[in-house]
Image (cartoon, rainbow, N blue to C red):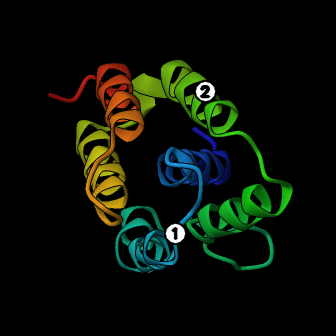
Amino acid sequence: MDYQEFFIETGRLFYAIAMADGEVQPSEHKLILEMIRRNLKELESSSDAFGTANAYYTEFEIERLIDFKVEPPEAFNSFIDFATENLPEISPELRFQLVQMAENVAESWNGVVHSEHDLLVRLKKTLKVE
């Protein structure tokens, strides 16, 4: 699996969850940045040709999506397509952690709203996480 692509797609996932209610709230954005540094960077330590940890591509992608005001379903479906194609290469532990982090993003602003809940259900089904 291409880890740089994995982290870009993870950025799309987190963006879609955060944007499900219409806006990436500052608290959601802050939490995502913390999770990148605290969780994602620890999960996989690969780096690009310039020595940048691939985990930071999650952050770069979120910033790009915010700047271009990408529709949440487009970002979410991109992640789902990637996950479906690469599911055998994504460990059960990593799948579980992705779901946990997505749930944390959804809960970070006014709890989980209906649109976020629907995305989380689809994410769990795709990643085969109970």
Q: Horizontally, is 45 left or right of 70 in the view?
A: left
Query: What amino acid is found at the position of numbered circle 2 in the picture?
Result: Asn
Where 71 falls versus 39 (above or below)? above
Q: Horizontally, is 127 left or right of 72 in the view?
A: left
Q: Nearer the viewer, mark 1 or mark 2?
A: 1
Q: For residue 108, what is the image quadrant?
A: bottom left
Where 46 falls versus 97 (above or below)? below
Name the residue: 61% across, 44% down.
9
Secondary structure under the numbered disc 1 in the rendered image: loop
* Distance of label 1 from label 2 (alpha carbons): 21 Å
Judging by the rendered image, the residue that carries numbered circle 2 is 77
Comparing 17 with 82, the one in front is: 17
- How many numbered marks does the figure carry? 2
Q: Horizontally, is 70 left or right of 28 in the view?
A: right
Q: For residue 50, what is the image quadrant?
A: bottom right
Q: Position of residue 6 (x, y in %)?
A: 58, 46
Name the residue: 28% across, 50% down.
103
Name the residue: 56% across, 66% down.
55
Indicate which disc residue 25 carries.
1
Q: Position of residue 42 (x, y in %)?
A: 37, 71
Comparing 20 with 88, the one in front is: 20
Q: Residue furthest left?
A: 130
Classify 10 Å Cα crowding around label 2: few (below 14), some (14-19), many (20 and above). Answer: some
Q: Earlier in the sequence, mark 1 or mark 2?
A: 1
Query: What amino acid is found at the position of numbered circle 1 in the picture?
Result: Gln
Q: For residue 113, what is the image quadrant?
A: top left
Q: Position of residue 112 (x, y in %)?
A: 28, 48
Quadrant, the N terminus? top right
Where 43 falls versus 124 (above or below)? below
